[in-house]
Image (cartoon, rainbow, N blue to C red):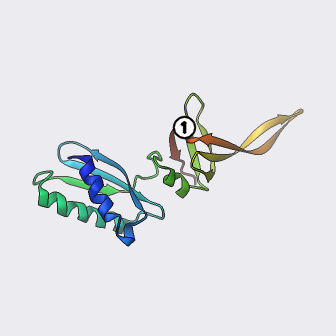
Amino acid sequence: MEHNKIARLLEEKFKEPEFSDCFLVEVKNSGANKLEIFVDSDSSITFDKCRSISRHLESIIDEEQWMGEKYILDVSSPGIGRPLMFKRQYKKNIGRKIEVFQVEEKAMVGILTEVTDESITLEQNVRVKEGKKKVKKTIQTVIPFENITKTKVKITF
């Protein structure tokens, strides 16, 4: 299955008003007869949106016989455990705790407070030594996108 075909079909679907804030995150072939599609949106990706997208794709895949008679099509949101891949996913997660892995740096965990075209800002509560005491301080760290290798949203309870 050619991923570009799926991307083009989804572009058509995403022109509909109800899906205008949706975007393709990843197309994954899992074996000869399983296709996984991960979609996200700037607001929220619901079960109904995923089902509608799945039905749209199924109708064309069946008509064109791209995957034969029997196949599995799974359309879902990327889920909390999958890394963020697009700037628009970062914007949607402002205020949430994230873990940022950087080129040649230690991973950092903090609250995502700002997203620009070039970078993100991470807020962290740290303990620093002032004289003989350790004091809690809140620091803001700006991380350029070019330094980020992977970012995951952290689940907090």
Instruction: Name the amino acid type tagged 1.
Output: Glu
Q: Is residue 13 left or right of residue 77?
A: left
Front residue of 135/61: it is 61
Q: Quadrant of residue 95?
A: bottom right
Q: Is residue 123 left or right of residue 49?
A: right
Q: Position of residue 69 (x, y in %)?
A: 10, 54
The extreme right residue here reads 131
Residue at horizontal 54 percent and vertical 37 percent from the top: 146
Front residue of 66/128: it is 66
Residue tagged by mark 1? 146
| 17 shown above or below 22 | below
| 79 shown above or below 137 | below
Rendered-image quadrant of the C terminus: bottom right
Residue at horizontal 37 percent and vertical 56 percent from the top: 39
The extreme bottom residue here reads 17
Q: Is residue 83 left or right of residue 16?
A: right
Q: Quadrant of residue 73?
A: bottom left
> Within 10 Å of the Cα at label 1, are there few (<14), some (14-19), or many (20+) other Cα atoms?
few
Q: Position of residue 23 (x, y in %)?
A: 39, 57
Judging from the image, what secondary structure is the residue with disc 1 in?
helix
Q: Position of residue 142 (x, y in %)?
A: 66, 43
